[in-house]
């Protein structure tokens, strides 16, 4: 592990708590090299995301596109054409965008339940929030236990800006919550395959009803009408919660006493011990934890060159924001506070950090 | 003017000062309708900006692209593919992006003047700032004096995020400012036409040296390497200053005792009284003033429909930021504080505002 004198580690201080999330760099250098090497043989972008920048993305499958580590800049916001995609079902037909204002969402579990069109939602208020959008499997590719699923590296995540109506405004307009509301349950509008029990494939997730404080029904992302790839015309956005809870093409929002019976809720997206199957008694992937990674410098080929560099990366704290980031360039013996750069876009956004570091000459085998 | 009871006015409070920038809506409704009507017969995008979204832009000429009012959302940041373009000379050959790190900029008027490559600049630090980028002629199309130049409506402006090295870091690395530095002068790297006095066409602008506090040499915009259309590979960004001062393809930064002798400085971009020619004794277009406009609701065709709407728009204060925005829906008799929505991205960014308003039925002629 002779690399430890030349590459930094990070050290996170989340919120005002003493939580420390140090993450070694043993894995990332080797992975970054593998990623760069794999670039030429890319699969083509799927049609529904054909407007994205192919050079910025790793196409794992039609439903799983990852942002390359080298594509993350230092501008806080991830541009839409570089943002990852993870769909649990094929995207609906693009025709659902032909008349955005006619899209309808059923609101249940309120005193006066009814369906509202997007045109009606637009009259109930507008708010804008920046959030980290992240697949809960992000980083899976680094796990030594080799769990099943897409081997995401760092790029099943981004930081984007949403505009839409606060869901609490909608609830207030419909008389408030009905009695017994414990969960906020969103249902996606994907077309379900025939011949299977709908509950085995339906995209329906429940989060604790406290998420109502921040949730949006969003029709705009990064300044443009929400694309099909990211859930347009309307998406349930639950700031600070893992990606799967942000229901695309949302057609129903229900305040329920129990969690959804859909398999994606009961037997998927649970915090399962390595080797075990997901089950309802395990914690669901709801609020994101403290996390950070380095996006640069990356070696063009082979090892990083010695010299002065700006180490930069991202850090976020789920619903709590980030207080600071520390970096060590000596394998954890000493730590220096990195500078948080760019505007603070609120507790649900990530912060980017930078620290000038002088990399010394390095010889020896790079770790995997 | 019977429209005054149905449409709001805005009322701006900039910084902590008592500056009031009320702007009537007499003009905008008619203009918005004209804009919508003109949409189908659009000119094609020029090649250097061919990656932009044609539906979002009005192509005035090869060098002047305007964002449609209807394309401004409520997500604070203007996506790059919708951002306006105004070039004073044809864009350089795209080959200047082939090796970004080899781009060189001469730094003069410092104790140890020298040229630095973009690769070297990247080692000197990185900062990220959100700024309003605006052509000083934005809104010219509304002026009753019909001044010459592109008849911009509201869309020669956007709010974007820049990343690069603080220029003050560069100056510090080169020993500090030389004596007598009064102006920060940037020179663009455009190819000059032959057979004319270079000073008549050179893009070179001087701003007061105090702008050094905030200026960046930027290589990234909105999370992507800076495009040719917006000045890549390297642009001088002067936060809070009118667009022309943000020199594209910057090849020289000089700290000078006098302003540039280029015509674009001496006899262009001056605050000239209507009908007069620009001259060096008039104020130069440097820091932006307080400004605001409404982006919605816009009529699909004809007049706005009565009913509940969210009036929304943007407001900015040059280098000072915005304290608040007030809206009147009764022709200025009463004013209500609009809600500032979305993250505050710092004093150089714009804020977006929204206010719920009930539009009443309207009859009569719409004003021009």
Image (cartoon, coloured by chain):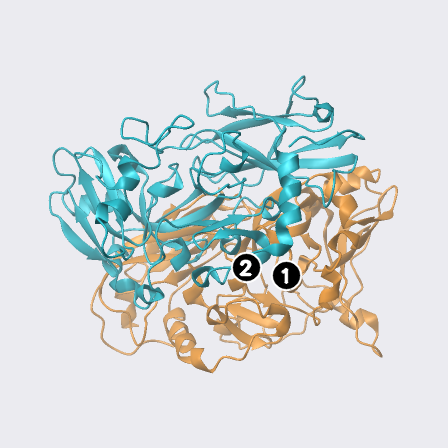
Chain colours: A orange, B cyan
Q: Residue A57, relative to residue A316: is it above or below? A: below
Q: Quick one: label 1, few (<14), some, or many (20+) residues within 10 Å?
A: many
Which residue extends farthest bottom?
A41
Q: Between residue A154 and residue B252, name the one nearer to us.
A: B252
Res B74 seen here: yes
Picture coordinates of residue A117, whole percent (x, y): 80, 50
Picture coordinates of residue A160, whole percent (x, y): 55, 53
Q: Which residue is mark 1?
A: A230
* Distance of label 2 from label 1 (alpha carbons): 9 Å
Picture coordinates of residue A350, whole percent (x, y): 49, 51
Question: Which residue is found at the position 76% from the left and 31% from the top?
Answer: B359
What is the quadrant of residue B264 in the picture? Answer: top left
Say which chain tag 1 marks: A
Q: Residue B38, relative to residue A72: is it above or below? A: above
Res A337 seen here: no
Q: Which residue is mark 2?
A: A80
Picture coordinates of residue B280, whole percent (x, y): 27, 30
- The secondary element bearing badge 2 is classed as helix
Q: Quadrant of the N terminus of chain B?
A: top right
């Amino acid at each position: 592990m002779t690399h430890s004198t030349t590459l930094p580690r990070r050290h996170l201080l989340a919120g005002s708590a003493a939580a420390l999330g140090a993450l070694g760099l043993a894995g990332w250098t080797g992975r970054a090299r593998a990623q760069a090497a794999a670039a030429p043989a890319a699969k083509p972008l799927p049609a529904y995301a054909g407007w994205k920048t192919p050079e910025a993305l790793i196409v794992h499958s039609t439903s799983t596109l990852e942002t390359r580590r080298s594509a993350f800049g230092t501008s806080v916001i991830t541009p839409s054409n570089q943002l990852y995609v993870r769909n649990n079902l094929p995207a609906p037909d693009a025709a659902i965008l032909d008349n955005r204002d006619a899209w309808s969402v059923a609101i249940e579990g309120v005193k006066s339940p009814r369906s509202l069109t997007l045109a009606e939602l637009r009259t109930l208020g507008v708010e804008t929030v920046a959030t980290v959008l992240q697949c809960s499997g992000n980083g899976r590719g680094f796990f030594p236990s080799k769990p099943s699923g897409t081997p995401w590296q760092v790029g099943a995540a981004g930081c984007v800006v949403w505009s839409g109506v606060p869901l609490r405004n909608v609830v207030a307009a419909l008389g408030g919550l009905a009695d017994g509301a414990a969960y906020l349950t969103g249902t996606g509008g994907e077309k379900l395959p025939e011949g299977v029990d709908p509950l085995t494939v339906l995209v329906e997730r429940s989060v604790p009803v406290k998420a109502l404080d921040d949730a949006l029904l969003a029709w705009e992302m990064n300044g443009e009408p929400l694309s099909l790839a990211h859930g347009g015309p309307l998406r349930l956005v639950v700031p600070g919660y893992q990606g799967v809870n942000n229901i695309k093409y949302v057609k129903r929002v229900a305040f329920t006493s129990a969690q959804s019976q859909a398999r994606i809720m009961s037997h998927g997206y649970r915090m399962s011990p390595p080797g075990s199957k997901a089950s309802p008694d395990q914690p669901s992937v709801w609020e994101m934890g403290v996390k950070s990674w380095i996006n640069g410098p990356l070696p063009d080929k082979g090892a990083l060159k010695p010299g002065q560099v700006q180490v930069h990366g991202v850090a976020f704290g789920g619903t709590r924001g980030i207080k600071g980031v520390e970096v060590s360039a000596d394998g954890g013996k000493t730590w220096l506070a990195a500078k948080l750069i760019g505007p603070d876009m609120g507790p649900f956004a990530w912060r980017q950090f930078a620290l000038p570091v002088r990399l010394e000459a390095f010889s020896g085998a790079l770790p995997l």
